[in-house]
Image: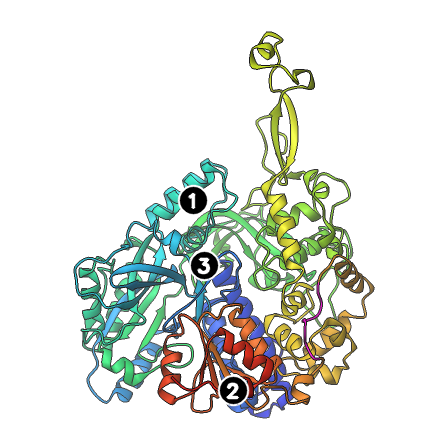
Amino acid sequence: MANETATEELSLEQAAGQAGELTERILAARDAYYDRDAAIYSDQEYDGFIHRLEELERLFPELQSQDSPTQTVGGRAETTLFDPVTHAERMLSLDNVFSIEEFEAWAAKTERDSNRHVDYLCELKIDGLAINLRYESGVLVSAATRGDGVVGEDVTDNIRSVKSIPTRLKGTGHPSIVEVRGEVFFEVETFRRLNAMQAEEGERIFANPRNAASGSLRQVRENKSQAQLDRMYRRLEGLSMLVHGIGAWANPPVASQSGTYELLKTWGLPTSTHYRVVDSARKASEFIEYFGEHRGSVEHEIDGIVVKVDELELHDELGATSRAPRWAIAYKYPPEQVNTKLLDIVVSVGRTGRATPFAVMEKVRVAGSEVRQATLHNQDVVKAKGVLIGDTVVLRKAGDVIPEVLGPVVELRDGSEREFVMPANCPECGTPLKPAKEGDIDLRCPNAKSCPAQVRGRVEHIGSRGALDIEALGEVSAAALTQPLVPEVPPLVTEAGLFALTIDDLVGIEVIVKDAETGLERLDDDGEARRRAPFQRVTLEYPPEADGLDAAQRRKAGLRKNVRVVHPSAQAETLLRELELAKTKPLARILVALNIRHVGPVAARALASYFGSLDAIRAASREQLAEVDGVGGIIADALIDWFTVDWHLEIVDRWTAAGVQFATPGHPGPGAAAAAGGVLAGLTVVATGSLEGFTREGAQEAIVAAGGKAASSVSKNTDFVAAGPGAGSKLAKAEQLGIPLLDADGFRRLLEGGPDAVRDTKPR
């Protein structure tokens, strides 16, 4: 991050700039980890961003908003692949510590706040996918991912294939409603067998068990052949789950976390055999240290230890922050280190043009997964680490997730090693590399419009979940559209033509098949590069002279099905269908898809809510842009710069001609709702549960567009609560406080006519 002035010396504008940059980094990290099963920062870096943002928001309260990363957890539930599910109780995250000293400081504070003796439950922190199971009268009715902690993805159909999860609880006397939380994962040996099967069938090799678990559970059945469905069910059946907590459960008949586990076990729910209850923080530290030395002895991957206060009554007394309970902490283990050979250093160019050196190494297993590549960031980092091509290097996983080269083992050099030289020109398009501005360390390719790597990266970003959420526009499709072997001129020279693609554009595309790990071309039996046509399906048909002949006549004439007929593949049809649907997605998503620097989902929602159209954003001055809550000067400058580039405007023009909507229907214009008061001016509204016709994000945007404040929690200052199925604790709180409650129809009337339109609404 840019140089950080001491917090107390910052002006509000400087603090807002830092907060905006921190927010974008945190949201990007969450999107990568929760939605794309990847990681771009270590745990320590991520926690540092969170703590810095919390500090800024304490000193400048006006910077805090309801969707600040300090107030939310997890990723988003914005995918169109699964229905949204609102958790009856929020699925919180956990705060992290990275040393025994930090852990014991947390325990000391917990004991002071508890004002009595504390027993701790210690358990292994499984590196898997968090899941919420909802049982009604002992029957499994839904399963959902964490999502953003409030709304997750409905994966019920897939979870029923996981053998360790009962669809009906054992015994009797089950509560009418109970939510149990746990982790879905692959055991180490199962993961190895899965990857062996993937390799044998020519499918993608998973980087680690967590990625494999997340990818397996979030599979969809649509457009799959029978063989693909069989493979899908094999993966689902290989998953395991361990339960480690409860959500909604009125008056559980147990007094402790450990007692809860024993009860859940009698119901047939899978619980860990590795937990222990101890009577002091010192003994908890010993548990942490023991498994730190014996991580490899556990049947599944672990990345730390979770320590919880065992007494449930203390859970209520200690409470929680907006993101995490105060009665639990996660101790994260330091990453493992191994030695391997540095075979080469190659340079990759991303969608922003940044040229990044990558270490290519002999494959080695570290912290639970096989690694062959690691980023070296820039030429100065390569120099600072002192590594030479051919070195034996020390490799670790930062936060047990991100591969990192620490440095060379100098004693093992034999004189054959050679120094890395940063190329002067872009390896993708040949344009001379240079810093974006004076003083920058990173080198970039300035050929933003036409560099194939940058175009590919931008097209892939357009399809990402944070942008237009086009499942068929992933890494492979983006590469095929921008860097094909055939045709010579790619269908997309820039992203401007994306929404004008036709079936004919897609069917003729051929690409070279490359290894997912090394990027090297895969060869066929003759030593030639393997080619693939991702958007076509080929069938063998009878020749024309077979027309009108029956089977016997065809046999007599020696006619066989030997004529190749090319058809569009299901992938091609799905891509065009999803592109058509994307044309009318919310303005905020369209803004993210334009690849404007610094404009992520948070800033895009703020801009869309305030201005209502791209034309209004383009016409606004820097001051008008910067004044919008959630935007600020840095993003304002980026927007103004973006609109000065001719080929950016060509994207807008061609997307508009193709039918993309750059305006929110019915929006009253820039700031009009706020300036005119709006029908909800001065009112605070909470939308919770599944409101028919609204996504969670859409309901909040509608409240803001009508001049109101969209709050995330219910308090005595709340004027209305719009509650749908699954509203949970917010509904109960509204009833307790006597706040008027609205269903989806009432919510629509409120948005259209204000309080007078729902005057007859009374508290329940």
The kind of residue tagged 3 is: Arg
Which residue is disc 2 drawn over? 684
The kind of residue tagged 1 is: Met
**Quarter of the image with the N terminus in it:** bottom right
Helix, strand or loop at label 2? It is strand
Give the residue at x 60% y 80%.
752
**Closer-to-camera residue (739/561):** 739
Query: CB of mark 3 within 8 Å of CB of mark 1?
Result: no
Give the residue at x 70% y 63%.
443
Query: CB of mark 1 within 8 Å of CB of mark 2?
Result: no
Q: Residues within 10 Å of mark 3 (few under 14, many from 20)?
A: many
Mark 3–mark 2 Cα distance, whole angstroms, equals: 49 Å
> Mark 3 or mark 1, which is nearer to you?
1
Q: Is residue 479 magenta?
A: no
Q: Is residue 286 left or right of residue 7?
A: left
Q: Position of residue 135 (x, y in %)?
A: 29, 63
Residue extent of the magenta highlight: 661-668
**Closer-to-camera residue (715/319):** 715
- Residue 232, which numbered label? 1
> Mark 1 or mark 2, which is nearer to you?
2
Helix, strand or loop at label 1? It is helix
Mark 1–mark 2 Cα distance, whole angstroms, equals: 45 Å
Which residue is disc 3 drawn over? 396
Q: Quadrant of residue 278?
A: bottom left
Task: Give the mark nearest the N terminus, 1 or 2.
Answer: 1
